[in-house]
Amino acid sequence: MLTRPPTRVAMLTYDGVNLIDVSGPLQAFQTAGRLAREAGLPTPYELRILSAGGGAVTTSPGLPIMTEPLEALDGQPIDTLIVPGGTLNGQPLAPPDLVAWLRRRGPEVPRPCSVCTGAFLLASAGLLDGRRATTHWDWAARLGERHPAVRVDADPIFIKDGPVWTSAGVTAGIDLTLALVEADLGHALAIATARQLVVFMKRPGGQSQFSVPLSAQCAPDGAFRDLHAWIAAHLHEDLRIERLAEQAGMSPRTFARVYAAKLGRTPAKTVQAMRLEAACNALERTDAPLKRIAADAGFGDEQTLRRVFQKLYGITPAEYRARFSRHAEMV
């Protein structure tokens, strides 16, 4: 019986690359491959780790990994390309030789992907022009500033726009890989892989649950920093735009326009994000009843809190607490 050859996955590396951006996806692919073979299926993936010159590459925590040179795949198809992130002295790494290689090979790859600040390499090679893309929430604004042709969305854990996949920071590479495994091998095997890795198949919520809040952190010039601090201390109060404008010393119309221009979202969305963050923190760190959490975070009542969680995270506050609270691992 003829079987199709395994999907060739090329992991692009360089000195200073984030170790988990490399190891997380590779482990997920390896685990999926093992489970597929145990189920009697052909080996689904061929994993290749590449760098410009081959040999040992030193990752950001100092652990070296062995790689093949880029030329090892000259004339050979690459089915999936993973470009991990890495930074040095507060700047995303985008080695010119790798950018040049991506310009040459990237357009012919059916599924180019990035993890974390690897999006800067894809963008530098022109592979994200005109596309919606994401990266680590702390780098999202800078990605948009440096590459205005990219439509940056800071919140999703990962995004697929056409053939190109981009993912958020660090462990989001595992979320991305599970989605690739699901596309290749089906939902059941992807779920089994997630169970083996002890991670969510589809993580609830976006990156905003991990920032303080995402919109405030992404403002390039620290715009409205004092206002955000004031909002955080008054979440339980009425925070309509008139109140916020008064606190910012502007008319409501001017405030709404300037705020949206600087942060890329409305004041109301920031208030909601901060209220959600406060509620999530309370669910994770306290045993307070939902009624009190809803009131303290400014949602008014428990039912409103439930509706918002269900709409944005796809789970209830109680389910969130069961997964993420300090007691969750003891349950």
Image (cartoon, helix red, strand yellow):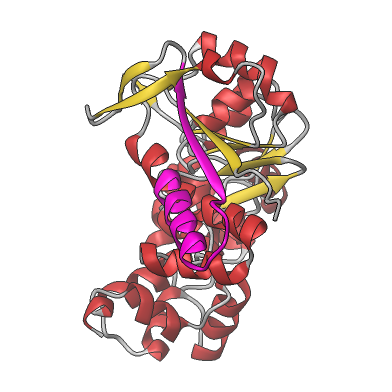
Q: Residue furthest front?
A: 1
Instruction: Inspect the magenta stretch and tell me whether residue 39 lies in it.
Output: yes
Q: Position of residue 158 (x, y in %)?
A: 58, 50
Q: Is residue 125 visible?
A: no
Name which residue lies at 53% across and 79% down.
315
Residue 164 position by quadrant:
top right
Name which residue lies at 34% across and 69% down.
281
Point out the image quarter for the C terminus.
Answer: bottom left
In this view, the residue in front, 129 or 189, is 189
Q: Position of residue 270 (x, y in %)?
A: 55, 57
Q: Left of 163 or right of it: where is 136?
A: left
Q: Which residues are magenta?
A: 25-51
Point out the image quarter for the N terminus.
Answer: bottom right
Q: Is residue 247 visible?
A: yes
Q: Left of 236 or right of it: where is 287?
A: left
Picture mark count:
0
Is 48 above or below relative to 68? below
In this view, the residue in front, 307 or 295, is 307
